[in-house]
Image (cartoon, rainbow, N blue to C red):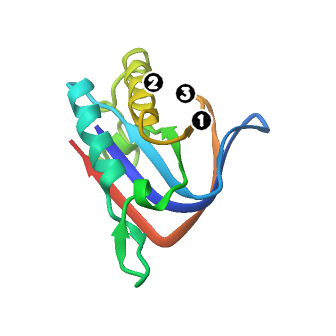
């Protein structure tokens, strides 16, 4: 399981011209799954994500988590996090979990995350347009 975390101002996910998820500030989280991912990995990475100290404190030091800072999370399914380009210029996605299994884990991930913070989402498997203001910029990869 891989999670790409971006500290964000406004962020919007649109599908076919309709907004499916929108936050004013918080985190944009791109999440991908691979073979062997399960609920225990989801729990581990959710805890890591909500406690990740990447928001500024009163001294402008990244010392606050999303739980301290407030805001919300825009969660986007992203199988391309498992792209492999070692054999040429065309990425292989063989390490990405298939859609039928990945959607179950993605929904479980969002349910687990929603226990702690407000979560907006894209639409699994859709062609999404994501607009965001990356603050910092701060972008961090979490993996289990």
Tell me whether circle 2 and circle 3 mark residues in contact (CB < 8 Å).
no
Q: Is residue 122 above or below residue 141?
A: above
* Pointer 2 or 3: first along the chain: 2
Quarter holding residue 91: top left
| Residue at left offset 45%, top offset 31% | 110
Name the residue beneath numbered marker 1: 122
CA separation in Å, label 1 and label 2? 11 Å
109 or 32: nearer the viewer: 109
Could you say whether the residue bearing mark 2 is in a helix, strand or loop?
A: helix
Q: Tell me if residue 38 can be seen.
A: no
Question: What residue appears at the point 41 percent right and 75 percent down from the top-left corner?
Answer: 57
Question: In this orientation, which residue lies closer to the viewer: 71 or 90?
Answer: 71
**Contact, mark 1 vs mark 2 (Cβ under 8 Å):** no
Which residue is disc 2 drawn over? 107
Is disc 3 placed on a helix, strand or loop?
Answer: loop
Give the distance between the C-alpha atoms of the residues marked 3 and 1, in whole angstroms: 9 Å
- Count neighbours of disc 3 (C-alpha within 10 A) and say few if under 14, some if 14 to 19, many if 20 or more: few
Secondary element at tag 1 = loop
Q: Position of residue 25 (x, y in %)?
A: 59, 58
Q: Residue tagged by mark 3?
A: 125
Instruction: Tell me residue 30's x, y (percent).
Output: 45, 45
Report the label total.
3
- In which quadrant of the rendered view does residue 134 lie? bottom right
Pair 3/1: label in front: 1
Residue that appears at 36% across and 49% down: 50
Image coordinates for residue 52, horizontal then vertical, percent: 32, 57
Name the N-terminal-most of marks 1 and 2: 2
Can you say which quadrant of the picture contains the C terminus? top left
Q: Count neighbours of disc 1 (C-alpha within 10 A) and say few if under 14, some if 14 to 19, many if 20 or more.
A: many
């Amino acid at each position: 399981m891989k999670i790409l975390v971006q500290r964000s101002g406004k962020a919007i996910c649109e599908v076919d011209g309709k907004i499916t998820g929108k936050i004013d500030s918080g985190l944009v989280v791109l999440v991908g799954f691979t073979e062997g991912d399960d609920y225990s990995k989801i729990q581990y990475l959710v805890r890591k994500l909500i406690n990740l100290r990447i928001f500024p404190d009163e001294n402008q030091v990244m010392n606050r988590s999303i739980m301290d800072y407030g805001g919300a999370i825009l969660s986007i399914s992203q199988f391309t996090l498992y792209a492999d380009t070692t054999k040429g210029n065309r990425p292989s996605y063989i390490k990405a979990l298939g859609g039928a299994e990945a959607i179950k884990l993605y929904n479980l991930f969002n349910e687990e995350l929603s226990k702690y913070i407000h979560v907006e989402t894209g639409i699994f498997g859709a062609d999404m347009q994501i607009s965001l203001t990356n603050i910092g910029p701060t972008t961090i990869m979490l993996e289990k």
